[in-house]
Image (spheres, rainbow, N blue to C red):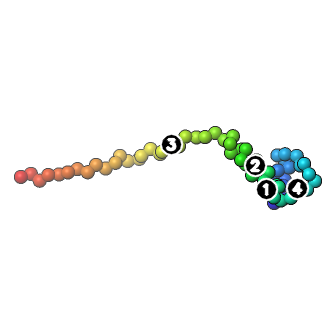
């Protein structure tokens, strides 16, 4: 929790002399939410197939 307090103080100056843990945690979540909305969205791509699909060969008996 102390590390969380330190990170939040570095991001935003402290408003009160000693914020409670719940307030610090809410500020931390709000900051993460802001960062997440700024992240670019990458399109989902499927990996290329390494082998072609096997085809079923029907063999007829010669009569």
Residue highlighted by disc 2: 30
Which residue is most to the left?
A: 63
Measure the C-alpha gap from mark 1 to mark 4: 10 Å
Q: Earlier in the sequence, mark 2 or mark 4?
A: 4
Inspect this view and state whether residue 3 appears.
Answer: no
Please state the horizontal and vertical placement of residue 3, each as a whole percent of the image. Answer: 81, 57
Measure the C-alpha gap from mark 1 to mark 2: 9 Å
**Camera-nearest residue between 56 and 20:** 20
Horizontal arrangement in the rendering, residue 56 relative to residue 15 (left or right) = left
Label 3: few (<14), some or many (≥20) within 10 Å? few
Q: Earlier in the sequence, mark 1 or mark 3?
A: 1
Residue under the point 17% across and 51% down: 59
* C-beta proximity under 8 Å, tags 2 and 3: no
**Camera-nearest residue between 14 and 53:** 14
Residue 19, labelled with which disc?
Answer: 4
Please state the horizontal and vertical placement of residue 36, each as a whole percent of the image. Answer: 68, 45
Please state the horizontal and vertical placement of residue 24, each as a whole percent of the image. Answer: 82, 55
Q: Earlier in the sequence, mark 2 or mark 3?
A: 2
Label 2: few (<14), some or many (≥20) within 10 Å? few
Disc 1 vs disc 3: which is toward the camera? 1
Measure the C-alpha gap from mark 2 to mark 4: 15 Å
Measure the C-alpha gap from mark 1 to mark 3: 35 Å
Please state the horizontal and vertical placement of residue 63, each as a whole percent of the image. Answer: 6, 52
Label 1: few (<14), some or many (≥20) within 10 Å? some
Q: State which quadrant residue 2 falls in.
A: bottom right
Label 4: few (<14), some or many (≥20) within 10 Å? few
Residue highlighted by disc 1: 25
Measure the C-alpha gap from mark 3 to mark 4: 44 Å
* C-beta proximity under 8 Å, tags 3 and 4: no
Residue highlighted by disc 3: 45
Residue under the point 35% across and 46% down: 52
* C-beta proximity under 8 Å, tags 1 and 3: no
């Amino acid at each position: 929790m102390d590390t969380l307090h330190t990170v939040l103080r570095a991001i935003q100056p402290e408003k009160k002399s000693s914020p409670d843990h719940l307030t610090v945690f809410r500020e931390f979540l709000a900051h993460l939410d802001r960062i997440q909305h700024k992240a670019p969205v990458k399109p989902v791509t499927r990996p290329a197939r390494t082998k072609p699909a096997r085809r079923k060969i029907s063999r007829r008996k010669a009569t």
